[in-house]
Image: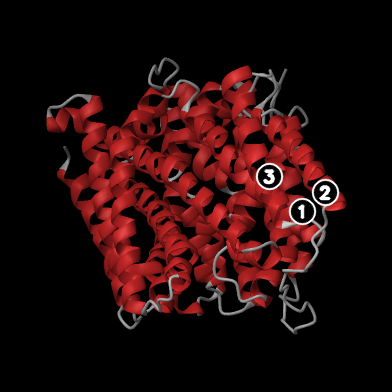
Amino acid sequence: MNAVIVISFLVCTVLVAAVSWYKTRSVNLKSVSGLFLAGKNNGYLVVAGSLLLTNLSANQFIGENESVYINNLSVMAWGVTSVVAMLLVSEFLLPVYFKGGMVTTPDFLADRYDEGTKRWVSVIFLLSYVVNLLPPVLYGGAVAMTGMFDLPAWFGVSYWQCIWIMVWVLGLVGSLYTIAGGLKAITISDTVLGGGLLIIGICLPWFALKALGDGDIVAGVTRLLTKHTSHLNAIGSEADAVPFSTLFTGMLLVNIYYWGMEQYIVQQVLVAKNLAHAQKGMALAAVGKLVTPVLINLPGLIAVHLYPGITNTASVFPVLAANALPGVLLGMTAALVFGAAMTTYNAGLHGSSTLFVLNIYKPYRERRGGRPTDAELVRIGKRFEITISLLAMITAPFILFAHSGFYTYLQKVAGLFSIPIFTIVVVGFLTKKVPPFAAKIGLLFFMASYFACEYIFHVGLHFLHVLAILFVVTSLLMLAIGKFWPMQQQQMLMPDLKIPLTPWKRRHLAWLLLVLAMLCLYIFFSKWGVVKG
């Protein structure tokens, strides 16, 4: 292995860790506020950076480039159409969260329904993280590092054995980082890595396009835009991984849930100084999502031309990076992909710990007449992080045997946990009549029906359409229960919406420009733009 690559990787990794330590040295990590809430003083730049880097992991680098290589650019919808969801979350959900002083997403459900509903949803969140967040993040990072460094040849082991080794390296490092640094360290490292990813987001396409054009970048761009143009199409057909019609059904629901209700994402916003900083941070993160086709999807498009015969399609991104980038930049890219995997993994671990400690363990101790101290809660949180990290490291390598493609597998399984929660939150916002037991019935009905449709009966619809249909059906079921058995005593302690909170004054102009930019991207990558035939 080239020593320059290794040195570059180590320097970048140590630099990020050093900056994070320096910025967090004054935070009291022995208190619940310091460990779990980062002191609630992050500015909009830190909020934006932590949102982007928590969202951006090796899963996207590996999974989306694989999908582009196999299908076309329709997979960019997961990132680009997030703009609409982030607009809605910023305008309607964030004010409620801030006015209510909420710490975890299920806090709203406790106010609206009851503590039982909050516990149910907290358990579902935890199951989602243990099954479909932490293991895939470790697996994606392991695939990326294995491909970029050609680790099987270096270690003298098989690909399968190398995946096991890298999963445990990533898991152990991520666990130590999270336990030692808390949420503040995660958000700081996210911001530092964001600057590095911007550099790599420019450098990798530049060198890859030069390789595509035999040293001439203009020739490379010309070839990319004139050959195999079907891969440039963002308007997916029903046979593609992301049909265009799903953007208006399940895709919208999944994105609203992700940016407005997913605990490990929302937690990055709730630690902002105030509502205005939270909204500005989300707007800046939305700008980042609009450039993700260049950062995440362009390598897959270039690989279609350079490596038309790849059999292990999950290795598209690491193979391109290893062949196109000079040693220093390859080491830096590996460090940033490593860091991106770590930030998502760390945020998942931290979000899981926060949910368990504040929503399950602490209420349990209080019901038993105990008054847990901060020291006890922090100790239990760290032990819980160690436990679920070990589970993730044991199960992650087996994702290698997923048959539907890595990214499709992730999104399909995520729907089992995310949209049932989304449904009861939306119904809770819309009406005060639906009782707590209707929310519990809605959760069970949705999860059982979706599992049956996807894994037992195979109804022949795209899973995003299935999610949208079940959202409507479950909502109607809950509303019917509310009509015949309405809530007798109002449990909801909704925050007074007249409490003055100063929103970001220019948010509407920013959102208008962002939506117009999103529409322009779709026009450009369609038959009205660069797609021929």
Q: Earlier in the sequence, mark 2 or mark 3?
A: 3
Q: Is residue 404 above or below residue 479?
A: above
Question: Mark 1 falls on what kind of element?
Answer: helix
Q: Are marks 1 and 2 in contact (CB under 8 Å)?
A: yes
Question: 15 or 159, which is in the foreground?
Answer: 159
Q: Position of residue 151 (x, y in %)?
A: 21, 33
Kindly identify the amino acid type of the residue bearing the numbered disc 1.
Val
Determine the CA span between mark 2 and mark 3: 12 Å
Residue located at (24% from left, 26% from top):
159
Question: Mark 3 falls on what kind of element?
Answer: helix
Q: Earlier in the sequence, mark 1 or mark 2?
A: 1
Residue located at (50% from left, 41% from top):
296
Question: 231 or 14, which is in the foreground?
Answer: 14
Determine the CA span between mark 3 and mark 1: 13 Å
Question: Which residue is label 2 attached to?
Answer: 479
Question: Which residue is label 1 attached to?
Answer: 427
Q: Position of residue 258 (x, y in %)?
A: 60, 51
Q: Position of residue 332 (x, y in %)?
A: 31, 50
Residue with the most extreme left position: 156
Kindly identify the amino acid type of the residue bearing the numbered disc 3.
Ile
Question: Which residue is label 3 attached to?
Answer: 441
Neighbours of disc 3 within 10 Å: few (<14), some (14-19), many (20+): some
Quadrant (top left/top right/bottom left/bottom right) for the N terminus = top left
